[in-house]
Amino acid sequence: MNDNHPAANGPARPLTVADVLALPVLAAGQPQVVTGVPHLDRPVRWVHITELTDPASFLKGGELVLTTGMPLPDDAAGVRRYVDELADIGAAALVIELVRRYHRPPDALVDACHLRGLPLVTLAKDVNFLEVTQVVHALLLGNQAEAMRRTQHIHEAFTALTLRGAGPEDVLSAAAEMSGRTVVLENLVHQALICEPSGSTVEEALAGWEQRSRATGPGDHTAIRGPEGWLTAPVEYQGERWGRVAMLPGRHDRTDRTDRRDSTDRTDGPTFGPEDITVLERTAMALTVARLIHPTSWERTAHRNVLRDLVEQRHRSPADARTRCAALGLPTDRSRFVVTLVDLGTGHGGTEPETRLFQELRTAGIPALVGELAPDRLGILLALRPSQPWRPVVERLCSTASGLAPQAVVSVGSEVTDLSYTARSFREAVRVAEATPPGQPLPPDRSFHELSDIGLRRLLYALREDTRIQEYTEQRLGRLVDHDTRHGSELLTTLRHYLDAAGNKTTAARRGGLSRETLYQRLRTIERLLDCDLESGEQRTEFHVALAALDVLRAH
């Protein structure tokens, strides 16, 4: 046997008729494929030598039948019956030796095999059939042993995932890696919650997902279904179904199916093998365990992951982002998007607020993604119709959020018209949240904060941990604070009154309860300590900013 033959070391795929014909032991007989060329990819499960007139009674399907032609009936009807029985039982191919009885295949045999799509192969030279069976059976047994090892590896890998409490993302990632195929988890309303692409992009895998999924009929067991030939398995526990997991054919699988359909109008060729079925069934089992031990629902996890990827711009392309959001039910065409952050306060996190806010939006008919972005902070991406105002929707969210946590703070980013711009809107909403101190009064006309609300003090609050702000404040006011501390004076207060009065000394004296002479004396002391000119508008601005920063730093 030639060690360079692809089947020599046990191919990963099943041994096919084409593989067997290429073996040196058969190639020496100068095989000629007379009929059934499109079906040479049929798997060969065994080799059967026969000189019986009814060999099908000893077959189970998938056999390569070897014969010298001696038992073939003489009449055309008998030949048709002989071929029909082989085709009905599922024989892989019929190989006839043209040495003893025939020197060319009988027309009746060729016609019958052609009619039933049974590969008919002739051998021009004598071949040792026993040697053929030994070689092929050795390969098949080797393949079976290798398949058992791979199956054992699959079981061990999924057992390890289950024992360490792996989440659904890890489970699907392992399934895609083991099978080399795209694997998708969907819920009962045909929303794609997790997609692990293999050999394709998310956009290619999930484009038009709901429509394609609904065309792939439901089922109670693992099977190939639908016009695209998906391999699907239900995910359920004690009669309660949660969704299903689908393994998608690769590009080469779709090409093969198209070729077979064009040539024979049949699509019964093997797209998925036994190992693929094992992987998908173990995936469904591992997902069931993950669902039982992880409190966060798949939908909430999916929303969180998509929102975080949008915020951090981790999508492969804008098209992938749109496809992934659309697969979760978010309309991405002709929509306007508004980002909202809800800071619930310490101890008010968990999955209940996410669920409540999502249900509120769903009740209102507002498509949205809702997910936790950080502890006690929820992100919400609203998808609105072009004519739909967003402020009433956010007000409704504010009302629900205050019911969940009375001190909840809602921040809103700018409205955008393209999903690829939502990262910017998220950044704006985060800046608003960072610039909103606890207890910050709301504007009189609304229950949320937006970018236009950020003034000087709120900007400094957002930057309070920046050492440059701290250094600036200390450099401008440190000597004055130290003087007041040592001497019990109130020069800082006097400076505040003076700056608040925009340099009007009479107003500053009245606010501080001082005589004009005392105010003048204190201002001169301040100018000496700080080495400044308080008549300078620019320097007064600098000190005003420093005082605002000092107030923020002291308060927080």
Image (cartoon, grey):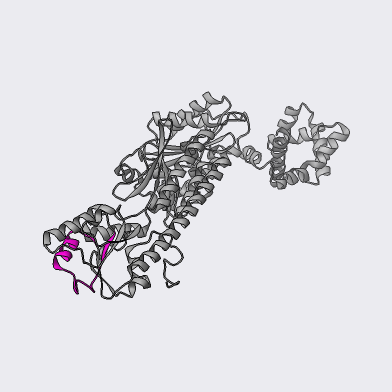
Q: Position of residue 232 (x, y in %)?
A: 37, 44
- In the drawing, does residue 546 fall left or right of residue 20? right
Percent from the top left, x then y, of residue 16? Answer: 34, 62
Q: Residue at x 28, y 76 (%)?
A: 125
User: Residue 278: percent from the left, percent from the top?
Assistant: 43, 47
State which quadrant residue 67 falls in. Answer: bottom left
Q: In terms of depth relative to the viewer, which is nearer, 150 or 292?
A: 150
Locate the C terminus by quadrant: top right
Tell me: residue 347, above or below residue 460.
above
- Residue furthest to the right in view is 487
Q: Is residue 167 above or below residue 54?
A: above
Residue 84 drawn above or below residue 301: below
The percent coordinates of residue 318 (x first, y second) are 44, 52
Q: Is residue 180 magenta?
A: no
Give the camera-side residue of 150 and 136: 136
The span shown in magenta is: 92-118
Q: Is residue 426 visible?
A: yes
Q: Quadrant of the N terminus?
A: bottom left
Confirm whether residue 19 shows in the render: no
**Residue plotted at (14% across, 68% down):** 107
Q: Is residue 99 magenta?
A: yes
- Residue 79 in which image quadrant: bottom left
